[in-house]
Image (tube, helix red, strand yellow):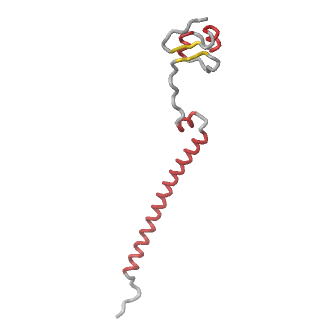
Amino acid sequence: MPRGKGRASAEEVILKAVESIVERASAGIARAISDILAARIDEELKAQVAKAVGKGRAGRIARGRGAARPALEKWVADRHARRVPNFVIEQTGLKTKKQIVARYGDNATFEKGKTPPKAK
């Protein structure tokens, strides 16, 4: 006697079980992928903003340009000098380049740890 059509074959039972497993797994995989992509997009946006804003101190540090200047050991009071180093101010007691040039003359050389040149 032939089997009734009401019974499912083994293949159909396995197929239904696999479909339900794949359905649940695909939802979890989709969530994991969206979390990973969201984190990656946030990182990229932060990097782009830091690069765009890069004109301030934080941008220079992010690009590696915030390295400290080497300490000055020698300073010449000439027309190209921009600022008076602290060791020159301590040696002379004068705070401006104009005052130092008036007392010591143009191109007076000051070295850290040595006595100041003779006044003119």
On screen, residue 33 above or below 84: below
* Residue 120, picture quadrant: top right
Which one is in front, 77 or 56?
77
* Residue 9 screen position, x and y as percent: 38, 82
On screen, residue 111 above or below 23: above
* Residue 8 screen position, x and y as percent: 39, 82
Q: Is residue 18 left or right of residue 47?
A: left
Residue at 44 percent of width and 66 percent of height:
24
Residue at 52 percent of width and 53 percent of height:
38
Which one is in front, 6 or 67?
67
Viewport quadrant of the N terminus: bottom left
Which one is in front, 50 or 96?
96
Q: Is residue 1 left or right of residue 26?
A: left
Residue at 38 percent of width and 76 percent of height:
14
* Residue 79 screen position, x and y as percent: 65, 18
Most distant residue in the bottom direction: 1
* Residue 55, picture quadrant: top right
